[in-house]
Amino acid sequence: MGEAKRRRKAGLEPRSLFRVRSAAIHEAAHVLADFHWDVPILEVYVERQGSDAIGFTDDKWLRLEPTKAVWYANRISQLAGPIADLRYRQHVGCDAEELEACVISCYGDFCDIMGRDGIKPEEGIRFGRACFLLYWGMESEVKILDEGSAAFTKTLVVDTTALVTAYAAQITSLANAILAAPDMKLSQAALKEWRDRNFEKVGVTLKGG
């Protein structure tokens, strides 16, 4: 059975449409996390690339005071996109191949969390798989992290999941706004307008930071 027919039978969107929405959910989660900590954002966009899609959120964490709490909040914002993306793919019933594609497509976020400089894409992907295993509660399957790193990453995943869950409805709303925008791009002014009309800050209890 071809992929297109298999997706129709499973009630899934064509891959190209699904990947665009997945990318919008991903970027919207970054933005909502940034809104939570009042981080300036210049723009957010999603771009179709063949049967795939990419997105980008131009936020300015460097404008905030470089405290330990801000450093940790930045890591949550970086992980929010992949976690929201994964949750969406699971919600619509994606198969293992599509979940693995989520890890690979998010490798840049994972490299950023690890520090970016000198981090190879394959290292980011391995770390991403560890994050997703921790999200699924499969801690015993995580083999690549030392005890200290595993404890930190587990807390980061728990806190990011809490934030993404708290803002789930707003993430969906903003993703719809991105998809409806010309060229699927929201400028700084458009983001401010959306925030003024729709954003409601939610209290989230964090274990780390």
Image (tube, helix red, strand yellow):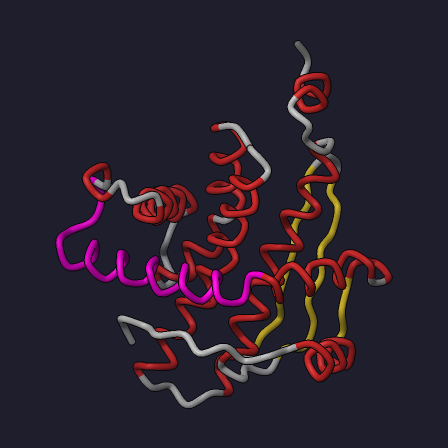
Q: Is residue 77 above or below residue 132?
A: below
Q: Nearer the viewer, residue 50 or 116?
A: 50
Q: Is 166 included in the stretch rendered in magenta? A: yes
**Residue 93: where, in percent of width, then height?**
56, 33
Locate residue 44: give its quadrant: bottom right
Q: Residue at x 30, y 47 (%)?
A: 134
**Residue 79: where, in percent of width, then height?**
44, 59
Q: Is residue 163 left or right of residue 4?
A: left
Which quarter of the rendering shows the C terminus? Answer: bottom left
Q: Residue at x 51, y 41 (%)?
A: 102
Q: Which residues are magenta?
A: 143-168
Q: Is residue 14 above or below residue 41?
A: above
**Residue 52: where, in percent of width, then height?**
68, 39
Q: Residue at x 39, y 48 (%)?
A: 124
Q: Is residue 112 above or below residue 120?
A: below
Q: Is residue 89 left or right of residue 122?
A: right
Q: Is residue 118 left or right of residue 39?
A: left
Q: Residue at x 54, y 44 (%)?
A: 105
Task: Name the dominant secondary structure of the magenta segment.
Answer: helix
Q: Residue furthest left?
A: 147
Q: Is 153 included in the stretch rendered in magenta? A: yes
